[in-house]
Structure formats: C-alpha cells, structure tokens
C-alpha cells in the first residue's frame, strides 16, 4: 500500500488477509477481480453522469461500496456515499461531478498500486 509521510495509506489489503486467514492466492485473486471490474464501473459512473442517468449512477455507486470498503479506501468512504445519496436528488450537479471525479481519479491510483501486488 502506498502512502506519503503525511497521509494515511491509499488502501489496505488487511481485511482481505483477515477474511482469507492469510491465503495469499485468495488475496491476489480478489485484487485481480477488483482491477478487472473497476474500469467498467468507472465507465458506467462517467457515462451515467454525462447522460444524467442518476438512477444508474446511484446504483453503480451503491454496488461499488463493498469493494471500496474491503480494500479500506478510506478517502472514498464519504465521496462514494455522497455520489449515491446525491444522485437521488441531484440539486448540485457540479458537486456530484466533483465527487465522481474524485472517485475515478483515486481508483485509477489504487488500481495502479494494486497491480504491483499481483
């Protein structure tokens, strides 16, 4: 997991190791699955925001939460939930776009770092 001296880690695999009782192959399999599925979810988020399909945006954000939580991506804990909540009543499109951008950019970084672990 990558971190700078003044920030907490971007992600953690501790929950996966705990869940798998230290099974390295399971952890690697879950990392690969995350890396394979996240780009499609990112695309769905961006496309649904662009087309103002807020129901799909809400659903994608909702389905992404468990994976983000499993990898302990703490900096996205609130933003992904804000996307899900604000997609129900999208009063401030700019704020919603900012949250989606934060999720997308952070996940790009996480996937690059996770790829190094496989």
Image (tube, grey):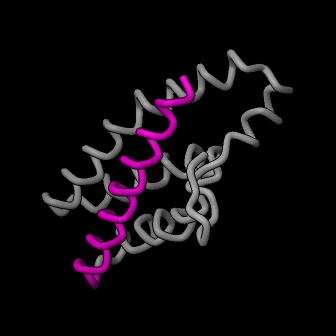
Outermost residue on the left side: it is: 51
Outermost residue on the front side: it is: 5
* 61 sits to left or right of 44: right
Q: Is residue 9 placed above or below 82 in the rendered structure?
A: above
Q: Position of residue 72 (x, y in %)?
A: 65, 52
Q: Position of residue 28 (x, y in %)?
A: 61, 22
Nearer to the camera, 42 or 89: 42
Nearer to the camera, 30 or 50: 30
Q: Position of residue 26 (x, y in %)?
A: 69, 19
Outermost residue on the bottom side: it is: 91
Outermost residue on the right side: it is: 21
Would you identify the image quadrant in which residue 106 lies? bottom left
Q: Position of residue 36 (x, y in %)?
A: 40, 27
Is residue 9 highlighted in magenta? no
Is residue 107 highlighted in magenta? yes
Q: Residue at x 46, y 72 (%)?
A: 82
Q: Residue at x 33, y 63 (%)?
A: 100
What is the total number of numbered labels drawn onto the structure image?
A: 0
* 108 sits to left or right of 49: right
Q: Which residues are magenta?
A: 91-118
SS majority, magenta:
helix
In which quadrant will I find the N terminus? top right
In which quadrant will I find the C terminus? top right
Q: Residue at x 35, y 42 (%)?
A: 41
Q: Is residue 96 placed above or below 117 in the rendered structure?
A: below
């Amino acid at each position: 997991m990558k971190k700078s001296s003044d920030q907490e880690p971007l992600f953690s695999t501790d929950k996966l190791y705990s869940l798998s009782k230290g099974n390295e192959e399971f952890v690697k399999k879950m990392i690969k699955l995350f890396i394979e599925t996240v780009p499609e979810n990112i695309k769905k988020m961006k496309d649904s925001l662009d087309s103002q399909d807020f129901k799909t945006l809400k659903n994608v954000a909702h389905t992404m939460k468990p994976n983000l939580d499993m990898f302990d991506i703490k900096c996205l804990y609130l933003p992904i939930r804000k996307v899900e909540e604000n997609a129900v009543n999208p009063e401030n499109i700019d704020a919603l776009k900012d949250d989606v951008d934060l999720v997308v950019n952070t996940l790009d970084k996480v996937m690059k770092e996770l790829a190094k672990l496989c």
